[in-house]
Image (cartoon, rainbow, N blue to C red):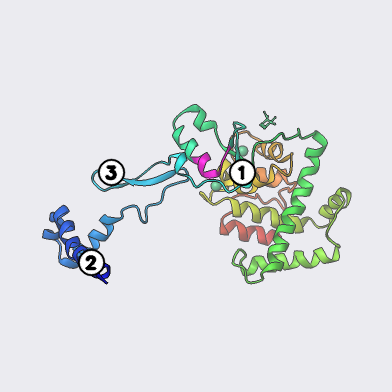
Amino acid sequence: MRVWIVFLLCLAGHAIAAPETEVGTNPVQVEVGEFDEAIEIEDVVENPCLNYHCKKGKVCEVDDSNTPMCVCQDPSTCPAAEGEFEHVCGTDNKTFDSSCHFFATKCALEGTKKGHKLHLDYIGPCKYIEPCLDNELSEFPLRMRDWLKNVLVTLYERDEDNNMLTEKQKLRVKKIFENEKRLQAGEHSLDLLARDFEKNYNMYIFPVHWQFGQLDQHPVDGYLTHSELAPLRAPLIPMEHCTTRFFETCDADGDKYIALEEWASCFGIKERCGQRLHHLSSSDGQQQFERNF
Ligand SMILES: *[C@@H]1O[C@H](CO)[C@@H](O)[C@H](O)[C@H]1NC(C)=O
Ligand SMILES: [Ca+2]
Ligand SMILES: [Ca+2]
């Protein structure tokens, strides 16, 4: 009982004391503003980091004047990895406990040549990845295209109300889905895939462009950077040893970006009807593309 009373007294004391100390620390705002405003300002002042967004590898901190800013995260403050599946491999072929550890480390190297060159290469601990042979590389787009199509069909099958696809896109996928049934999908031999592709060219265009649009988000500009490509590339590398070489050759002009034209042509999709496939990631482009479909 006594404990409770002491506790309540403490609470009450705290509640009474709190405005006083805050007014004390910030007298100018209280003088200038009305009481309501002062409270609002105080709320913001109390937690300037609350809605302050920092990119991966950085955390928000306030400086002496209570201004929020992003500083490199100390890797030791990253949550401990729960297993090997959280490990990531950097382009320096060094294993990091988690992507948090990776980005914190990269942040500390910001401004250095080493930091500029360091990227997250793939998900999982670094391992030996066998070289991709020329004939394997030439087969890769066929399988990848088929895989992208299956991703989209699965997405459609699982959840017709999903908001990943617009109504118009759903109609496209529905068409693919029905075509697919006719084609007896599943274990396609490469031969069959190649013939499939010629016969059903359109069926493969949409998934390839859809995927580009999904990735081209930061910013939406018709080009994929290394980090925009990462959500597709990073989980794929440990499973498909041609992934790295494939995306390297995709960047035909070697400027480190994969432009939509480069993307389309490395999946074997040619420009058609004299129309250039430019900026298809925009909704404009999506429509243009859908007209072509
Ligand atoms: C990367 O590291 C792994 C494991 O430590 C090793 O087996 C592999 O050979 C290395 N790869 C390269 C390209 O050095
Ligand atoms: Ca982009
Ligand atoms: Ca390029």
The residue type indicated by label 2 comes to Val
Look at the numbered discs 3 and 2 and tell me whether their residues touch, using CB distance below 8 Å.
no
Label 1 sits on residue: 259
Label 2 sits on residue: 6
> Of callouts 1 and 3, which one flags the residue occurring earlier in the amino acid sequence?
3
Q: Quadrant of residue 24?
A: bottom left
Label 3 sits on residue: 63
Q: Which residue of the protein is positioned furthest toward the left in this rendering?
A: 31
Residue 280 can be seen in this image = no
Residue 78: x and y, percent? 48, 45
Q: Which residue of the protein is positioned furthest toward the front in this rendering?
A: 2
Label 1: state its secondary structure: strand
The residue type indicated by label 3 comes to Asp
Mark in front: 1 vs 3 = 3
Residue 5: x and y, percent? 23, 70
* Above or below 254: residue 140: below
> Of callouts 1 and 2, which one flags the residue occurring earlier in the amino acid sequence?
2
